[in-house]
Image (cartoon, helix red, strand yellow):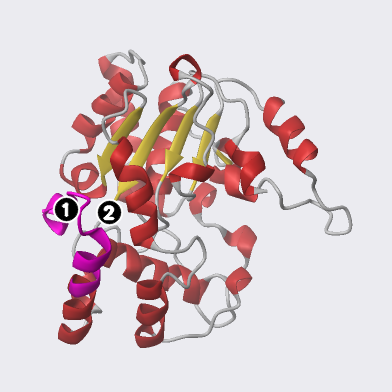
Amino acid sequence: MLDCLSRLKVCNDDVIITSWPKSGTTWTMEIVWQLYNDGKIDETQIDKKVKFLDTMFIPADPANPQTPNDVIKTFQGLPRPRLLKTHLNYQYVPMGEDRGSAPKTIVVMRNPKDAFVSYFNHYTGLAILQCDTDWEEFFELALSGDVVFGSWFDFVRSWWPHRHDPNVMFLRYKDLKQDLPAMIQRIASFLELRPNADLMAQVAQQTTFSAMRDRPSFDHSWFGQKPGRKFEFLWKGKVGSWKDFFTEEQNRRFDRKFKQEMAGTGFDLSYFD
């Protein structure tokens, strides 16, 4: 299945938004979708507006499994320009046969400690994941990469060497929080879009955390919510929430793990300062 995805025939007008989960993916997806759709508000499920590559093998009818040919046919039938999402490592993502066919790819990066905490909310709130755990147990799972979509460290190691590729843009969650209009302008420029000032202002206003938080397009209720728990897919939307969860020992262990896993990559936690 993964081999099939990596070989999909993409084009240079395709846009791929990639991240480790809970790193600002949905936020970036909506910004990109609005830039391509004149700032329209559309409450269609976000994963239908921006196609989730990783779930293309999940059949509508479990009795009729998807085949690689089914996936290829579905992909080829998506309207252009194709707006796509993935949480996969670089080697599994279709990146084109040559530079001329390389899709524009936005890699969204968030402080992994904040991403761990947000993923904990995700895991304990969505019924589809059938998970009953506390923070201490989840921290161990996330640190070892034993979660859906795997290790944060593996994800970053796969994408970081491509940060200077002409079709790749790295985008920090922190920068979106600090100066959303400037980041929307940067995204538009990368995508070679030329929205006028009014549209830029409109998109910036419509993609703040407060503007998006209660919209049904993002609540992910289609995955089910656990009985007795009020789940918010767009949860805190903050930088530094990890400090409310990590113990001092967990923080020390994470920092040691980070140094071990990222040694020799030239990447360190100061990237998120």
The disc at residue 110 is: 2
Q: Horizontally, is 219 left or right of 205 in the view? A: right
| Disc 2 element | loop
Residue span colored magenta = 256-273
| Disc 1 element | helix
Image position, residue 97 (x, y; %)? 53, 23
Q: Horizontally, is 247 left or right of 109 in the view? A: left
x 27%, y 64%: residue = 261
x 57%, y 36%: residue = 49
The disc at residue 70 is: none
Majority secondary structure in the magenta region:
helix
Tell me, yes or no, if residue 24 can be seen here: no
Q: Check the image and report above or below for 252 versus 70.
A: below
x 38%, y 48%: residue = 158
Tell me, yes or no, if residue 115 can be seen here: yes
x 67%, y 45%: residue = 56
Image position, residue 86 (x, y; %)? 50, 45
Q: Nearer the viewer, residue 87 or 95?
A: 95
The disc at residue 272 is: 1
Q: Check the image and report above or below for 248 versus 220.
A: below
In reply to whether residue 267 is colored magenta, the answer given is: yes
Q: Are marks 1 and 2 in contact (CB under 8 Å)?
A: yes
Image position, residue 1 (x, y; %)? 68, 48
Determine crowd level at label 1: few under 14, some 14-19, many 20+ residues with C-alpha closer than 10 A.
some
Q: Horizontally, is 152 left or right of 230 in the view? A: left
Q: Which amino acid type is marked by label 1?
A: Phe
Q: Which amino acid type is marked by label 2?
A: Arg
In whole angstroms, how far apart are the C-alphas of marks 1 and 2? 7 Å
